[in-house]
Amino acid sequence: MKEDLKVYNDALQLVGNTPLIKLNRITKDLTGDFYAKVEAFNPGHSTKDRIALYIIEEAERKGILKPGDTIIETTSGNTGFSIAMVSVIKGYECILAVSSKSSADKIDMLKSLGAKVYVCPAHVSADDPRSYYEVAKRLHQEIKGSVYINQYFNELNIDAHYNTTGPEIWKQTEGEITHLVACSGTGGTISGTARFLKEQNPDIQIIGIDAYGSVLKKYHETREFDENEIYPYRIEGLGKNLIPTATDFDVIDRFVKVSDEESAHTARMISKTEGLFVGYTSGAAFQGVKQLAEEEIFDANSKVVIIFPDHGSRYMSKIYSDDWMQEQGFSDSENLVDAEKI
Ligand code: PMP
């Protein structure tokens, strides 16, 4: 059992220093040691607590933010939740401009943490004044002393992980990590963590996980933006239809693409076999590991760290709903039978 019985002044003191947990069962056919950096242990249940806290505290240090000022962002996902949490604890207003495609559950979650939510039409283009990008930009210009987090284009997103996730993993593995496997959305997690780890040991292999339907892998290989790569997919938070400046493609050795279906089954398998109730992209990350293992890139000396970005509770009406799985045509239950055999 955990021995730390410290008392904390507020939930923000619990951001970061997440556990590294060895995966013991789902890895039984793989060669090497595999460890999950389980970001659901953050108080806001995802890795985004790190960037919300870091970017807001940087703005405080620079004197940009004063008590009562406003933080603005354009997301209904984990980043929105983390910014709302940090704002309520530190006494800032939080405005989140979200797409009307966002589920009512997500919007209610953000409102529960005191955020003001602007629901913007999903059907308009990004440069339409009604789009959530434009609404956020306009509010940022209008509200004096406001901070726009702008996670896809904010270098501080990388710095947050360079200063926290990277050093934690280096320490937790006592410098023995050989591979880092992480999902890439804004790219902040993989870029910041990799930048720190490569400085310690340039031989560490950095593998990004991308979705079919996203441009990141192709861009990494060609440095060209290929619109033909873009089509709709189900996994949220992974991959992108634009090139974020919060991704440092130079510190990433390669990308692996994973499918919606296999990632969903793999997330369910992690919960069933390891007792770690993880989100969709954790399934995507481990699906990538399985594909890499098929290429035999790991050996008995490999120490592979996989970042599990968030908690499964956010996906009850998605990957953890049998009905949803069936609606997507993901009804193949072979993996579930396998889980019982392990
Ligand atoms: N998984 C989930 C669930 C996320 O919300 C995100 C953030 N978009 C990621 C993975 C990817 O992290 P990053 O943005 O740091 O690349």
Image (tube, rainbow, N blue to C red):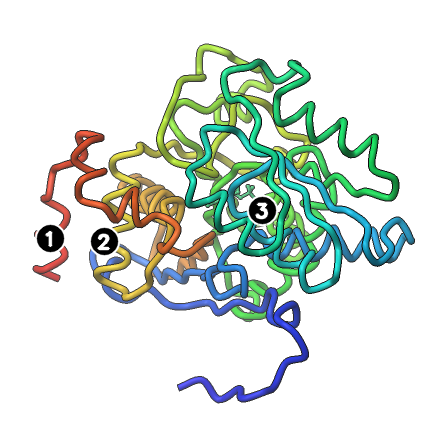
Q: Considering depth in this image, is 258 or 251 the residue closer to the camera?
A: 258
270 up-or-down from 1: above or below: above
Q: Earlier in the sequence, mark 3 or mark 2?
A: 3
Q: Earlier in the sequence, mark 1 or mark 3?
A: 3
**Mark 3 Cβ and ligand 1 under 8 Å apart:** yes
Assign a secondary structure to mark 1: helix
Verify CB contact (< 8 Å) between mark 1 and mark 2: yes
Q: At 23% from the left edge and 64% from the top edge, which residue is drawn?
A: 25
Assign a secondary structure to mark 3: helix
Verify CB contact (< 8 Å) between mark 3 and mark 2: no
Which kind of residue does numbered mark 1 sit on?
A: Asp
Residue at the spot of label 3: 79
Q: Quadrant of the C terminus?
A: bottom left
Which kind of residue does numbered mark 3 sit on?
A: Thr
Which kind of residue does numbered mark 2 sit on?
A: Met
Residue at the spot of label 2: 269
Q: Residue 338 has which mark?
A: 1
